[in-house]
Image (cartoon, grey):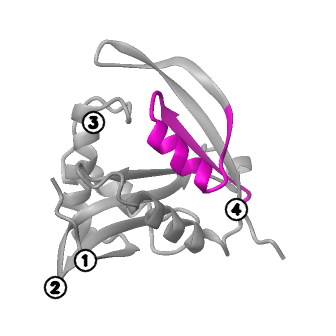
Amino acid sequence: MVSKPTEVQVRPGVEGDLGALTDLYNHYVRETPITFDTVVFTPEERRPWLLSHPEDGPYRLMVAQGCKDGTYGPLLGYATSSPFRAKAAYNTSVEVTVYCAPGAGGRGIGTLLYKALFEALEEEDLHRAYAGIAQPNEASARLHARFGFRHVGTYQEVGRKFGTYWDVAWYEKELGRKD
């Protein structure tokens, strides 16, 4: 369980976060159908993923870290924007995701992360953000709705994990400057 911090700092992820980010993600790999990865990663295996999210540009990594009495604690979560698909015509679309540390859910961490992520993306040449949410996951659906995402369809039984087939609901949000 993550103790309640006095404040939460949201900042771009850096290489020094790699171990904590890997541990956080591996929790979801081992314990949940939220990600369809089925084998845990080492930090070295996750390094290319981390490096694909620089501090600028359309592909970002934001982390939330608790602070109590001036001392920073463990990561509470992270949010990313990543390429939606590899073909050039998709370059103005991103796929976004947010993960909260075990015990940090329901405390507004996902909201802080998405707020920072979407603010960072405001000046980028982006048109749409997409999020795929393994079902059921009402908390994630509510978070995305709060940020203006709308449900656009569901892939039925698209992934198999833990011997069960899972649906993925897809959501989209308009991005871009509103000049």
Q: Foreground: 66 or 170?
A: 66
Q: Extreme right residue here?
A: 179
Q: Distance between the residues labelled 1 and 4?
A: 35 Å
Proximity of marks 2 and 1: CB atoms separated by less than 8 Å:
yes
Q: In the displayed structure, does residue 134 sit left or right of residue 131?
A: left
Q: Foreground: 47 or 164?
A: 164
Q: Distance between the residues labelled 2 and 3?
A: 33 Å
Proximity of marks 4 and 3: CB atoms separated by less than 8 Å:
no
Residue occupying the point 18% across, 58% down: 2
Q: Distance between the residues labelled 2 and 1?
A: 7 Å
Residue occupying the point 23% across, 51% down: 103
Q: Is residue 42 magenta?
A: no
Residue 38: image quadrant is top left
Q: Which residue has dot 2 on it?
A: 69
Q: Which residue has dot 3 on it?
A: 29
Q: Which residue has dot 1 on it?
A: 6
Q: Distance between the residues labelled 4 and 3?
A: 29 Å
Q: How far apart are marks 3 and 1 (CA)?
A: 29 Å
Q: Foreground: 62 or 138?
A: 138
